Image: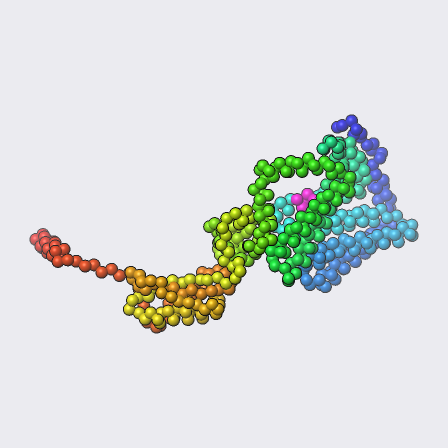
Amino acid sequence: MPASATPVPASDFNFFREVTELLADLRGPAVLWQFAAIAIALLVGWSVTRWLRTRQEAQVAAAKLTLRVSTPLVALVLLLLLRVALQHFGVNTAFVRVALLWLATFAVVRLVVHVLRTSFKAAAWMESFERWIVISLWLMLVLLVTGWYRPVWDWLEGFAFPIGGAKVNIAELLAGVIAVGVTLLAALWAGTAIEAQLNKAAGLDSSTRVVLSRVAKAVLLLIGVLLGLSIVGFPLGALSVFGGALGVGLGLGLQRIASNYVSGFIILLDRSVKIGDMITVDKYYGRVTQITTRYTVVQGFDSSEAIIPNEMLVSTPVQNNTHSDSRTQVKLPVSVSYEGDLDLALRILEDCAREHARVVADPAPNAMVLGFGADGIDLQVSFFIPDPENGTGGVRSDVARAVWARFKAEGVSVPYPQRVIHLNSTVAESIVSARDGLKSAVHKE
């Protein structure tokens, strides 16, 4: 322990005073008034939350947040008023004071958990991080109730270490973490609220919404960090060391990561790839379901998801099948025999494609002759569908089945491989002689 850290005498602790006051209240009739005030506050808070839940039908972020913190907040406000009334009549309020601290901590815990779950959806690390946050908040409550808060804080102030030419003790660092955490939570909540409002804006496309929400969150987080450090008087000049190290890291090992982030903003701003587009990049084909500042998610028709770095979408050719037109062409090859009615087969192909519900009328389905194969005439019908994100295999199969049924009904035959073998006279005589010789040998035996 450093020399500046001095032990705090046990007589300075407020724990025994708190316990003495609580025990004194238990021996008098004042405890009944305190328990009644606490029960009334909790009952009113629960009733208000129940009433709000019946009124809030739209499950928006603000409504969910209100429902989560309404019970402890309403009970906290009402209990504060009841405490003033009890003190006016000379009633000691030791239990009410503990209940107020508990309600305040409970409200903060619910608020923090809600903001974290809203801002970091389905994050793997969220469960353990959330558990530590909750434990820390309840530990602070225990320190406040027992009176150990000030002695522990004075003890932490005795540990100091240099950062960038300035001395910072653990208490200041902890206060900075708490202040930054509070401002970051406020920034995350504000960013989530802004993102929700942007998603409701009908005049903005999906890429613009993503760009604005990402920029808003980044700016709010930066402001939150700087504001939190400024609140506790943390020397911002000490961050220059971290900034220099970050610059060196970006120049050496993090340039690919930085390139992905820059490429992400380029994609979102120039709208070359948008959410919902059907793209082909490298060996991956599917629908773009998510664009972040670092990567893009492409979902295939088998529900598999490919994580494509944004740098790859900028530096390599990308085939966007729905960039300017959401309609996609589907082709179905068919063969008919040479003896069949060619015009009838072409007409059947176009009719079967036109009758399908997912095939658009404009441009109309088109059937054509591709060539003359060894076994039959090769045909192809091409048509457009407006929803390629729902897959092309199903519509191709439906049209093929309809064509097969019409071919059988109209008498159009589908060819199968046929081979004609021509034998000259010498080979034929040799085969006949070999056959006769084999029969004679078998007969003699």
Q: Quadrant of the N terminus?
A: top right
Q: Position of residue 320 (x, y in %)?
A: 51, 56
Q: Position of residue 370 (x, y in %)?
A: 36, 63
The residue nearer to you, when weighing 72 against 324, is 324
- The single residue placed furthest to the top in the displayed view is 3
- The answer to whether residue 363 shows anywhere in this view is yes
The residue nearer to you, when weighing 383 against 78, is 383
Residue 368 colored in magenta in the image:
no
Residue 132 colored in magenta in the image:
yes
Q: Position of residue 438 (x, y in %)?
A: 12, 53
Q: Is residue 123 left or right of residue 40?
A: left
Q: Is residue 390 left or right of residue 95?
A: left
- The single residue placed furthest to the bottom in the displayed view is 410
Q: Residue at x 68, y 62 (%)?
A: 58
- The single residue placed furthest to the right in the displayed view is 89
Q: Position of residue 206 (x, y in %)?
A: 60, 57
Q: Residue at x 83, y 47 (%)?
A: 97
* Rendered view: 22 above or below 268: above
Look at the image and give the residue range highlighted in magenta: 129-134
**Display coloring:** rainbow
Q: Residue at x 49, y 50 (%)?
A: 317
The residue nearer to you, when weighing 425 against 310, is 310
- The answer to whether residue 407 shows anywhere in this view is no
Residue 401 picture quarter: bottom left
